[in-house]
Amino acid sequence: MLLENITMADFQKGLKKTKTIIIPFGTVEEHGSHLPLSTDTMQVYEVVKEVAKRVKVFVAPPVHYGVLTSTREHPGSIGISANSLRMITRDIVKSAYSKGLRNFILISGHAGNIHMSALREVGEELIDELDDIKIAVISEYDMIRKESEKFVETKDDGHAGEIETSRILYLAPQLVKGMAREEYPKLPKPFLVRDKVKYWKGGVWGNPVKATREKGEKLFLFSVMKVAEVVKKVEKMK
């Protein structure tokens, strides 16, 4: 049940079948010269919409903005602070809780460390505050990473590389603009630098040239299966 498409009467009827809601998180973030800025949002939202066709669950509209670190200086990247993400997540969950929802799956298409830490932090706070709430926090990208190793050719593939390009080729091929070259960031770790574009000009981590629609479909279907499993598990938990 997509919240954006149902009425309040539909919502009340739905509560009799499930008290679980999936809240997807994405970003407005550069993904090389070939993928759309909404790549993270698109990947996770399409997955959870498909999940909603297979199991009884509410799906919230995606939160389109997230915490950006290594990509925040690139053209088109528009992010929010970790504090803003914590606050909006807290507000959404508490409001949904007040309407009768009890099981929350916070799933992010963006796997940034600070971004994910913010989601986990607010989740930990909420389970301490609300006795009968259940919360799962998932990085969708990390969830499929091991499965991708079975057929993805790029060993150290990451942002806007073989995996993500394959997924967008499957979900929205018309949005793939040509193909960026293989690239990896050269950030001088452990040092923090302001001008990240200087060390990562193309914004690609991996080899998008090896991407295929078929690989994207496999990853999409695997992710749908895993999220559906989480929905079933959270409803059985006591």
Image: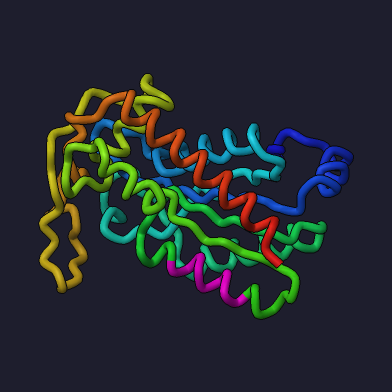
Q: Residue 51, image x and y in percent?
A: 59, 38
Q: Main secondary structure of the magenta part?
A: helix
| Vertical arrangement, residue 225 with respect to residue 199, above or below | above
> Is 17 on the left or on the right of 208, as rendered?
right
> Is 36 on the left or on the right of 102, as rendered?
left
| Vertical arrangement, residue 88 with respect to residue 33, above or below | below
Q: Identify the residue at image location x=71%, y=67%.
A: 238
| Vertical arrangement, residue 58 with respect to residue 46, above or below | below
Q: Residue 56, image x and y in percent?
A: 71, 41
Given residues 59 and 29, the one toward you in this image is 59
Q: Residue 188, image x and y in percent?
A: 11, 66
Q: Which image quarter: residue 180?
A: top left
> Is 106 on the left or on the right of 16, as rendered?
left
Q: How many marks?
A: 0
- Which span is picked out in magenta? 117-125
Q: Is residue 121 magenta?
A: yes
Q: Is residue 13 magenta?
A: no
Q: Identify the residue at image location x=65%, y=44%.
A: 59
Q: Which image quarter: residue 33?
A: top left
Q: Identify the residue at image location x=31%, y=33%.
A: 35
Given residues 116 and 193, the one toward you in this image is 116
Q: Identify the residue at image location x=58%, y=44%.
A: 228
- Quadrant housing the N terminus: top right
Q: Residue furthest top?
A: 174
Given residues 37 and 152, the one toward you in this image is 152
